[in-house]
Image (cartoon, rainbow, N blue to C red):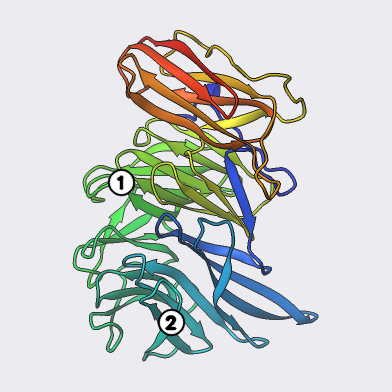
Amino acid sequence: MKKINWKFILILLILSGSVNAQWVSSNLPLSGIIRNINYVDKNDIYVNQSYTYFPFPQTSATTVRLFKSNNSGASWYDIFSYAGQMYQSLGMSNVSFLNPLKGIFGFSQSTSSYIYKTTNAGANWTSTVIPYSGFSPAKCNYLNDSTYVVLTTTGGPNYQVFRSTNSGISWSFSSLPVSGYMNNMYFLNQNTGFIVTSDGNILKSVNSGSTWDVINTGVLSNIMDISFLNSSTGFAVGIISLTSSVIFKSTNEGNNWSVIDTITTGQLNSISCQNPSVVYVSGVNRVIKSIDSGDNWTEILIFQDEGSAYISCYNKDTLAVSKLNSVYRSYNGGTYVKVNSNIIPDKYSLLQNYPNPFNPTTKIRFTISQSVLSPNGVGGDLVQLKVFDIMGREIQTLVNESLQPGTYQATFDGSKLTSGVYFYRLTSDNFTDTKRMLLVK
């Protein structure tokens, strides 16, 4: 059984709603809890939110909303909202995009269900009725210009899959081969899809959701999410207990699954992969990351508040994590942490990495003594920390953002490099320094 490499862990504590330097946070403008997040392109992020309020004691009502950010999460605006009446049943699925312009989501009120579609990146939406009463869309997938696949529920562990091949004009539906709660539906391409269940089964379709086969993982767990690096290699995450979760891996197109890790530090519920080898997993109290297809894991963020966190990555370094009513974004894949934010250094410095020689990871510490504010009074020194090989070719950018005065620490992972001499260079508005390090395998 593999364990998280605690020796080289990066812990980012979220205190009083703020995050450490590598994470940027923003809150949605209206109260509620985020249920899904989708990083569509380099600027556009979508989140689904629900808000339950009590107009009278013990009498609840619900509002569902879809928010969008078109500036990588810096600000948000409401693009769909529906306020239910007391006792009215509302449902809203994830939003699924075929490309940055074309997307769909499912919505239900009482016994009526709809698919909403946009062709202009969420600026406008048109609705299509699903002509079956009592089915609430739980998950949507937009497979091609005319094909929608929708996982629906009638309440409790009762699910069916609806399909339309003519943009919602007509629908067919099929029952699933197992009962139980269906937690997510994910399509690798327009033909191959998966549904993860609460009883350790993974359902697979190779015909755009027309029929589904049962794949038993062999572990009784509440499988919450699934994602693939490529056509053959995929990962799934399941909950075993209140304090433990399991990570599965498949290397044969999802036909067989094996356990690669058991995490005993809390529940994990969301996963997002980025080819060729980066996997992010989030949960109730943390976000972990693997850069080697699940062989090793590193913690990159820890939460103090209870509540599920959902994750979506745009590329291997750019990701967004939703937690309660906040969204946290990182643009360097969670590679460094601020060590001391209380003592302001009196000078710039770049320290020798430790350990040195190293295999395969090493820590690089540096200090920033002053910040240069932008005209609007925010920001700081633009700091870059880069690693180069002996030929002067850039290997990796560890830091590339504006930083306030403080002491910082980065971790460099050379697991995919050959033994030899490497250089790391720190540059800012007022400082440049380069040091040498030695990777020995």
Task: Pick whichever of labels 1 and 2 is earlier in the sequence.
Answer: 2
Residue 100: horizontal and vertical position, in percent? Answer: 36, 65
Residue 151: horizontal and vertical position, in percent? Answer: 38, 73
Q: Name the amino acid type tagged 2.
A: Trp
Q: Secondary structure at mark 2?
A: loop
Direction from residue 332 to residue 315 in the image, left or right: left
Residue 125's disc is: 2
From where the camera sits, is residue 286 visible?
yes
Residue at the image position 24 percent from the left and 71 percent from the top:
144
For mark 1, what is the residue? 229
Residue 344's disc is: none
Direction from residue 198 to residue 341 in the image, left or right: right
At label 1, counting other C-alpha atoms closer than 10 Å, the crowd grade (few under 14, some 14-19, many 20 or more) is some
Near-viewer residue (379 or 389): 379
From where the camera sits, is residue 1 visible?
no
Direction from residue 172 to residue 221 in the image, left or right: right
At label 2, counting other C-alpha atoms closer than 10 Å, the crowd grade (few under 14, some 14-19, many 20 or more) is some
Q: CA distance from mark 1 to mark 2?
A: 31 Å
Q: Please, which residue is most extreme toward the right here?
A: 57
Quarter-wise, where is residue 146 in the image?
bottom left
Residue at the image position 60 percent from the left and 71 percent from the top:
50
Quarter-wise, where is residue 169 in the image?
bottom left
Q: Label 2 near label 1: C-beta < 8 Å?
A: no
Near-viewer residue (285 or 326): 326
Q: Secondary structure at mark 1?
A: loop
